[in-house]
Image: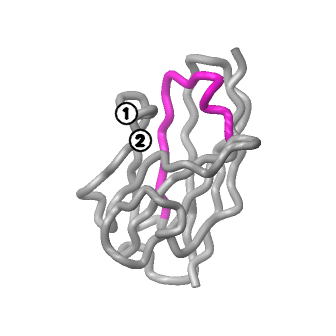
Amino acid sequence: QVQLVESGGGLVQAGGSLRLSCAASGRTFSPYAMGWFRQAPGKEREFVAAISGRGAYKQYAEFVKGRSAIFRDNAKNTVYLQMNSLIPEDTANYYCAARISGGLPVAPNEYDYWGQGTQVTVSS
C-alpha cells in the first residue's frame, strides 16, 4: 500500500502561484510514476501532469503547459506541482496519484493509489 497526502492548496488571486506537495509513505517511492489530476464541481477528473520514477520523463496537459512544472524529490518521498499564472478556470480539487507500472498515462483509472486532494481556488 501507498499512502498519499496532498498539501499546499488554498485561495489565490488570478495571476498568482501555488506549489502543491504530495507526500508518499508506505512503500518505496522511487519506482512509482506520479501524476497530478484535478476535479472541479460537476466535471470529470482530468489529467494535469505526470512524472516518471526518476524524474527523467514528464508529461503535461495542454492547459498547464508553460505555466506549471512537476518535479519530485525521492529522498523526501514527495512530488510537487508548481503552478504559475493561475486563472479562475484552475479552481478545482487537486489530487496526486501513484502508478506501479511504467508509462505516464493520462487516464485516472491507470493509477493505483490516490490521495484525498487539496483544494485550489483562484479568484478573479
Query: Residue at the top extreme?
Result: 124
Marks 2/1 in contact by CB < 8 Å: the verdict is yes
Residue under circle 2? 61
Q: Position of residue 75 (x, y in %)?
A: 40, 67
* The quadrant where residue 29 appears: bottom left
Q: Amino acid at mark 2?
A: Ala
Q: Quadrant of the N terminus?
A: bottom right
Q: Residues within 10 Å of mark 1 (few under 14, many from 20)?
A: few
Residue at coordinates 43% horizontally, 48% vertically from top-left? 49
Query: Residue at the left extreme?
Result: 56
Where 47 falls versus 55 (above or below)? above
* The quadrant where residue 95 appears: bottom right
Residue at coordinates 51% horizontally, 53% vertically from top-left? 36
Number of residue marks: 2
Task: Tell whether position 86 is magenta.
Answer: yes
Q: Position of residue 28 (x, y in %)?
A: 44, 81
Residue under circle 1? 65
Q: Secondary structure at mark 1?
A: loop
Residue at coordinates 44% horizontally, 62% vertically from top-left? 34
Residues rendered magenta in the picture: 78-92
Where 119 falls versus 66 (above or below)? below
Where 34 falls versus 112 (above or below)? above
Q: Position of residue 69 (x, y in %)?
A: 40, 40
Where 117 falls versus 66 (above or below)? below
Q: How is the image coloured?
A: one colour
* The quadrant where residue 2 appears: bottom right
Nearer the observer, 33 or 104: 104
Q: Amino acid at mark 1?
A: Lys
Q: Quadrant of the C terminus?
A: top right
Q: Secondary structure at mark 2?
A: loop
Residue at coordinates 48% horizontally, 45% vertically from top-left? 48
